Amino acid sequence: MRHDGATLWRLASAQAKAFALAAVIALAVFAMLLSVAGKDPLRAYVDTLVYVFGNAYGFSELLVRMVPLLLTAVAVALPARIGLINVGGEGQLYMGAWLTTAGALAFAEWPAFVLLPTLTLLGFVGGGLWALIPGALRALRLVNETISTLLLNYVAPLIVGYFIFGPWRSPESSAYPQSPAFVEAAQLPTFFHSRVHAGLLYALACLVLYWFVMTRTRFGLEMRAIGGNPEAARRLGVPIFSYMLAVMFVAGGVAGLAGMAEVTAIQGRLVSELSPGYGFIGFLVSWLARTGAGGILTMSFLFAVISSVGDILQITQGLPFAVVNILMAVILFIVLAQPARSVGR
Amino acid sequence: MNTALVIGVLATSIMSGASLLYATLGEMIGERAGIVNLGLEGIMLIGASTGFAATALTANPYVGVVAAAAAGAAANLIFAYLVVGRSANQLAAGLSLMFFGFGLSALLGRPFVGALTHSLPRLTLSGLEPNGTAARLLSHDILVYLALPVALLIWWLLFRTRWGLQLRAVGEDPAVAFAAGLKPNVLRYQALTIAGVLGGIGGAHVSVALALTWVEGMTAGRGFIAIALVIFAKWNPLWAVAGALLFGGAEGLQLQLQAAGADVSPFIMNMLPYLLTLLVLVLWGWSRQLAAPAALGRSFVGVE
């Protein structure tokens, strides 16, 4: 499908209007729920705005949060183009972090200019191999990838748990088991005296590459063919089997980079609570963006703002971060209730 | 393996199998009507937190179970409105329901973190030695005793009543069912209401009978295992009983080995149910004998 600029703009602004309406209604519904729970929603919203847009630090934290959202959203969008539903970004993130940690601990004496590319590769491979399991099971027509990716989300954190409670347990951590801290050379550089790190460049690069491959290459064309009509694509000689494996590997790898960035730039070590559900939020981002690259960028930003509401509720009003899931779900409910919406593929 | 361990595994497999069975039966009714609900995990979490909260507030676990059933039905009706009323994509709606459940249960359960509560009382047959083998195997709460009759009831409803025939017809082809004078969307609403009740009860059993405490995300993927169990059971409630016992057994084995101080990491043991689920799905996929309702996942817009 090709659109001229005007059509594209009209489509985008209609989408933006629909989303803004959904967000406003959702914020109102969420505020009502919080009031019933005896909390002060208005203060939480104002606090969030002040925190996020009030100073450079808050805004930089938004960029930090966008990194895992962008990466896991691409990890959902890419398979969606060939009709695969990857809900396993969370597990792939954990496995990327896991293999990165293995490398960071094993090659601790390497210089940074060798170590960091190695760790990036390991993060990619860790997530990629993890996603290859459901990819292969689907390509062999054994198990539906939706249910297998969901199930594997519960296994990956247990593998991480096993290692930080066992072989990798740092001697100086007793209450909260974690791996030993990474050496300086294994930490992604940060910018502007903030926590904004090179992972943001990875994320933007992945997004641009995703856009480029989908719109400007033969691979993108063939993938869109599979997504549009698998049977026709097969008869035209598109190797669907290989595409399923390759696409799931790359998608998992991209989500694995999110895990790599979390351990090398944010935590500096492997911990058990790596992600408050970034993989799942990435799924929402990708779905709401209808897997478009520009939409993913916008939605990641908006969901980074929304998830800041969760941080604020946690810090100032003593609620669990997970409560913000209500807000995200209600936005989705409203978008889903809008009529005649095509499946986000 | 010694006898005590075997008995322990059997007893826990019955206990944790029951909650899985309720959830599986709920999902199965929905799928028989042609609706996949990936939000079952969210429904179970809402059931678990509502059940726990209501039990803690009223000191009556039976009130807790009823409240959980009502909350499960109410939450599932949101999903039903989206997929039936608005013809929304079922996978996306299901996953949003899952998020909703994560969030709402965290909000509802927040005041009760760390609280202990009354558990569903265990009913023991009189005349059994209190700590004997028979008593350990045969003293369970009411939900465990009701699980098998509920499975039979749902089998009867689906395969021996007119309503069940109509429901299955809608699941196979809503357009044909509509042409035959049925109301596909009304039947789907009914199926999803029952599914919500059963999912909520399954969740309540986890918090009020198994764990006796509220922890965020405590159903730990049981909802997804139940969705896999529907496939395992080939959409037949009676096979669901066997599946629930098998997976309850995997969890029972893990708990008992941990209690017995086995030298296996709890993290490895905790992977067991998920890996077993995946293995079963692979084997079933291999045998290619799936009997999924033909219209699974498709919405019915109606004939204007």
Image: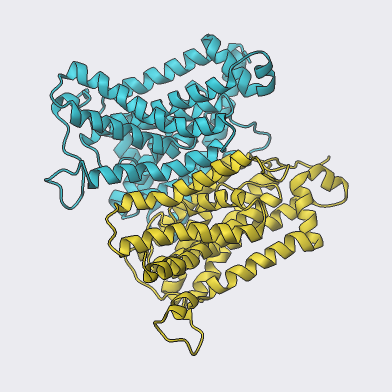
Chain colours: A cyan, B yellow
Residue at 48% of width from left, 30% of height from top?
A: A76
> Left of A114 or right of it: where is B31?
right
Above or below, B2 against B226 in this view is below
Above or below, B216 against A197 in this view is below
> Left of A63 or right of it: where is B194?
right
Q: Is residue A333 visible?
A: no
**Could you say where residue B107 lies in the image, as x and y percent from the top left?**
41, 57
Residue at 68% of width from left, 41% of height from top?
A: B87
Q: Nearer the viewer, residue A275 or A242?
A: A242
> Left of B101 or right of it: where is B82?
right
**Could you say where residue A294 lies in the image, as x and y percent from the top left?**
48, 21
Q: Nearer the viewer, residue B99 or A111?
A: A111
Residue at 49% of width from left, 83% of height from top?
A: B124
Task: State which quarter of the image contains the C terminus of chain B.
Answer: top right
> Left of A291 or right of it: where is B152?
right
Q: Is residue B182 visible?
A: yes
Q: Residue furthest right?
A: B180
Residue at 50% of width from left, 89% of height from top?
A: B126
**Could you say where residue B128 lies in the image, as x and y percent from the top left?**
47, 86
Q: Nearer the viewer, residue B254 or A65?
A: B254
Above or below, A190 against A330 in this view is above
Quadrant of res A309: top left
Task: State which quarter of the image contains the N terminus of chain B.
Answer: bottom left
